[in-house]
Image (cartoon, rainbow, N blue to C red):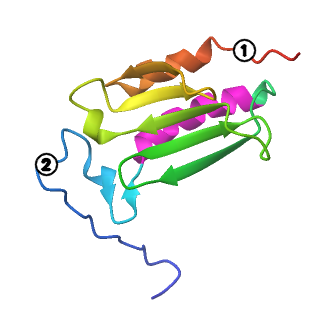
Amino acid sequence: MSDTEPIVLPLARKAGGNQGLPDTAYRRGGISFSRQELSQILNVYGRKVATGEWRDYAIDTLKEKAVFSVFRRSSEVPLYRIEKAPKLGRRQGAYSVIAATGLILKRGHDLSRVLLALEGLRLVEA
């Protein structure tokens, strides 16, 4: 294998279809964000980093959902979690924004509309 040769990961199909989500949603390691989804999330993240509100992030690919966690500092609990849970895709929507307290700020089928919940929020220092 050379350095220029791409690494191709085989997709693991789930019984019953993928409920309208791209094929990249189901991988061996678990659910993951597609390139377009990550682009939307990182656009919001970049704006918040530029204002100094956010400083770090983590991406988790779990068996039933993918999680993008946002931190003020890397040693703290996440301020917000952006989750993709395909099993909820037909009901409440596959995407959700969850605060550090566990409160679901927004849930829906369209990631760009769900991410709007983070746009109006400002960090308040005590």
Task: Please identify the residue farthest to the top as the structure is shown.
Answer: 120
Residue 114, position as x, y percentages in the image: 44, 21
Residue 14, position as x, y percentages in the image: 19, 56
- Which amino acid does the dot numbered 2 rest on? Gly
Q: On the image, numbered disc 2 is attached to which residue?
A: 17
Task: Please identify the residue farthest to the left as the structure is shown.
Answer: 16
Mark 1 secondary-structure assignment = loop
Boundaries of the magenta span = 33-49
Q: Is residue 33 left or right of residue 73?
A: left
Q: Residue at x 50, y 39 (%)?
A: 39
Q: Is residue 99 above or below residue 71?
A: above
Q: Residue at x 35, y 24 (%)?
A: 110
Q: Residue at x 40, y 64 (%)?
A: 29
Q: Residues within 10 Å of mark 1 (few under 14, many from 20)?
A: few
Among numbered discs 1 and 2, the one appearing first in the sequence: 2
Q: Residue at x 50, y 26 (%)?
A: 97
Secondary structure mostly seen in the magenta stretch: helix
- Which amino acid does the dot numbered 1 rest on? Arg
Q: Is residue 58 left or right of residue 123?
A: left
Q: CA distance from mark 1 to mark 2?
A: 39 Å
Q: Quadrant of residue 126 in the image?
A: top right
Q: On the image, numbered disc 1 is attached to which residue?
A: 122
